[in-house]
Image: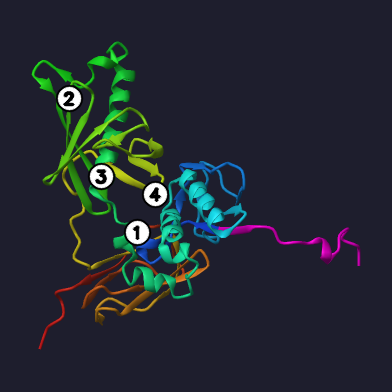
Amino acid sequence: GAPLGFAQSDVTLSGHAIEVRLYAEDPAQDFLPSTGEIVRWQPAVGDNIRIDDGIVSGQMISPFYDPMLAKVIAYGPDRDTARRRLVAALSDTVLFGPASNRDFLLDVLNRQSFCDGQATTAFIAEEYGEDIASHLALGFDDIALTAAVLYEALQDQTVTLAGHVPRELLGWGSPGGLSARLVLGDGATRYAMTLQQSRDGSLSVSHDGQSVVITGQGNDKRINGVRADIRASHYDGERVFISTSRRAYALLHVRTTSVVDTVGDGGRITAPMHGNLIGVFVAVGDHVAAGTRLAVLEAMKMQHELLAPEAGTVTAVLVAEGAQVPAGSLLIEIDVEGVETA
């Protein structure tokens, strides 16, 4: 019954605002929630921008809460101004650590149908179809840029450890430019990159018949003369994080060209994220068809069905219902060649 201090007639509409919700989820994996440490959180700042967040750098994103990390809101005198300001705010927002939907949100905001105000509840199906991953896949320029950032980070470490090597001598040799090989990893995929440094400091980065020339220091880099627009980068000794105005991603620095786990036959069922197994529906000896429901994992207020990727015979069930399992842990093994065909 207490008065508010203003009347309905005092409330007026002025301009336009658009809000997006930044989630710890991977659009390329059917928007599966993501967990892990926030290596860096650097929200955008500026006029007509508002960010409601509850996270800080160094914080762990656990499976026990909703995966929403922040709301990013932009205001303008009209819809398109608000949209463009929101694009700029997301481009300047840096989130290193768990996978997020930042790039997907940027892509949505730049789609012509969204710009024209024609988006409906069928927008994702109409614009992306069944394969969102292909729209967000890394290109060669992204991988080459990561190799250049890593190469420079390793050079910086060398200078720090040596203590007396002038930076001008880095990459120099009497025969001319020196070559280096770096291996980057993205899941099970490995990229063996070759880097050739010229005396002018430029890097020729090549892999599998493709090549680009990268120039510049720090985040001020160009790819074949075109500004890479790096907003932030970070190397933690294991992963290389890159955030540009359109992409944010991380690649693993693989210190050997050998692949430790070559078991990719579909018979190893692992936990896609940290969570609680609320159901296990198979036992050793069971015959399963492709698509058979094996277990259900609960995480971040969502239930995720784990399905058999191929037909086979269950040879091991390593967990029990009610178990709390970490991401990547082996849950079930299937012998995909164990089913006799008629």
Mark with earlier residue (1, 3): 3
Mark with earlier residue (3, 4): 3
Mark with earlier residue (4, 2): 2
Q: Residues within 10 Å of mark 3 (few under 14, many from 20)?
A: some
Residue sitting at x 36%, y 48%: 249
Three-letter code, disc 2: Ser
Is-magenta flag for residue 6?
yes
- Which quarter of the rendering shows the N terminus? bottom right
Question: From which residue to which does the magenta span run?
Answer: 1-19
Query: Which residue is tagged 3?
Result: 141
Three-letter code, disc 1: Ser
List x then y, in percent, for residue 160.
Answer: 34, 19
Q: Residues within 10 Å of mark 2 (few under 14, many from 20)?
A: some
Query: Which residue is tagged 1?
Result: 329
Three-letter code, disc 4: Arg
Query: Which residue is tagged 2?
Result: 198
Task: Please count the marks in the image.
Answer: 4
Q: Nearer the viewer, mark 2 or mark 1?
A: 2
- Image quadrant in which you'd find residue 96: top left
Mark with earlier residue (4, 1): 4
Mark with earlier residue (2, 1): 2
Three-letter code, disc 3: Asp
* Residue, far left: 175
Query: Which residue is tagged 4?
Result: 246
Q: Nearer the viewer, mark 4 or mark 1?
A: 4
Asked if 231 appears above or below 330 in the picture, the reply is above
Q: For numbered disc 2, what is the local secondary structure?
A: loop
Q: Main secondary structure of the magenta part?
A: loop
Q: Nearer the viewer, mark 1 or mark 3?
A: 3
Residue sitting at x 23%, y 37%: 224
